[in-house]
Image: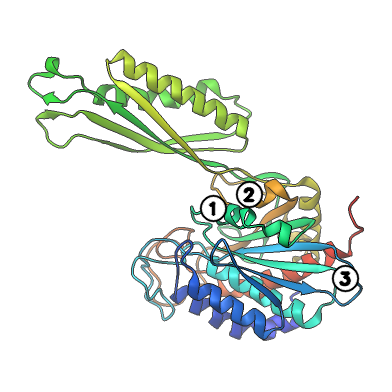
Amino acid sequence: MNIIPELKDWHGEFRDIRRDIHAHPELSYEEKRTSALIQSLLQQWGVETTSGLAGTGVVGTIRGKRGNSTRAIGLRADIDALPMQEANQFGHASTYAGRMHACGHDGHTTMLLAATRYLAQTRDFDGVVHVIFQPAEEGGAGARRMIEDGLFERFPVEAVFGMHNWPGLPAGEFGVCAGPIMASCAEFQIHIDGKGTHAAMPHLGVDPIMPAVQIAQALQTIISRNRNPLDTAVLSITQIHTGSADNIIPTHAVVSGTVRTYADSMTDMVEQRMQTITEQIAAAFNCVGRLKFHRTYPATINDPGEAAFCAQALKSVAGAAHVNDAVRPSMASEDFAYMLRVRPGCYFWLGSGDGSHRSEGHGEGPCLLHNDSYDFNDELIPVGASAWVGLAQQRLAQAEPT
């Protein structure tokens, strides 16, 4: 593996930065300490720094010294944490109750910071690299907010790239694919209104529980009977809430969950069928059914050309044996999707292993994303940073796209 020597030498320093960020997690749009740390380091390294996009977002601009090209690319890392209690008790565990870096954004930020320092010191490329530190990936659509704040007008790029650590993939291996790599996400709530009454006199009321049960069962037929079997979609009911006592038929019932697909047309079909099923089954039971369908993130779809380039660049860093350029996509979601909707680019994964890297004092749970025993694998810092550097240098060395 071709790890840049300077990044190896800086490993201890950046490990400490990562662990400091981990110990001080901040939720979406509240990343003031993290943003200030990023700005301070970028300015210390002589990087042009712009702050305030989407509130706490930061963009660093690094200009190469090989020529005077104005071509530019973007490298993005997310900086926010999750609203969950950490189970780990090692020295760098979260110092804030109910907040935790359980998805590795502390590591993503640190890998991009290390790459930024190297790129700023060497400037061994022709063109411009914009390093994008994005807030509010965890449900806050920070990528969309940065775009709305003029990200790509103020920092024009011909391509943009994102990276995420991936537990279960062997540590140090990369995964990339053309087309969809992460699914879209939509959340739904089905409200069913009936008429409450005493459970001993059901004929005097209108029971919302029976249509809720029937709707929950019927929704599964959308995937099994309305979806083309060659297309991918998931419809998961995750909550059913109703009632308050054993002897009361309630007035209301709520069924909620999530829908994941790789195509807007599939999401459209699922929503339309859910609407019909909700209204008509509820009506059959003399109830009123209302569907609330909220689309949060679109699918993350890699440009085929940029995915092919990205795979080749990663192979030059990690070796061909350590790059899976046809990795199976995930049904999880990622708001980097918004950036890929307005600029070509590629999102890829860096394997973080099985959790054996964790310090003594970790929780009893697995080292999986969004798990309270998770911790980022610090051995990845020079690996991911070297990948960022190689990708930036090689992308700007390519012939200018027509």
Q: Secondary structure at mark 1?
A: loop
160 horizontally vs 379: left or right: right
Residue sitting at x 42%, y 77%:
360
Which residue is disc 3 drawn over?
Answer: 126
Q: Nearer the viewer, residue 46 or 345?
A: 46
In percent of width and height, residue 321 lies at 75, 60
Return the disc, 3 or 1, that comes first in the chain's sequence.
3
Q: Amino acid at mark 2?
A: Tyr
Return the disc, 2 or 3, that comes first in the chain's sequence.
3
Q: Pointer 1 and pointer 2: residues touching (CB < 8 Å)?
A: yes
In percent of width and height, residue 359 lies at 46, 76
Residue sitting at x 68%, y 86%:
9
- Mark 2–mark 3 Cα distance, whole angstroms, equals 27 Å
- Mark 1–mark 2 Cα distance, whole angstroms, equals 8 Å
Q: Nearer the viewer, residue 282 or 8?
A: 282
Which residue is disc 1 drawn over?
Answer: 141
Q: Amino acid at mark 3?
A: Asp
120 horizontally vs 185: left or right: right
Q: Circle 2: is it few (<14), some (14-19), or many (20+) Cα within 10 Å? A: many
Q: Which mark, by number, is residue 338?
A: 2
Q: Which mark, by number, is residue 215?
A: none
In percent of width and height, residue 251 lies at 20, 28
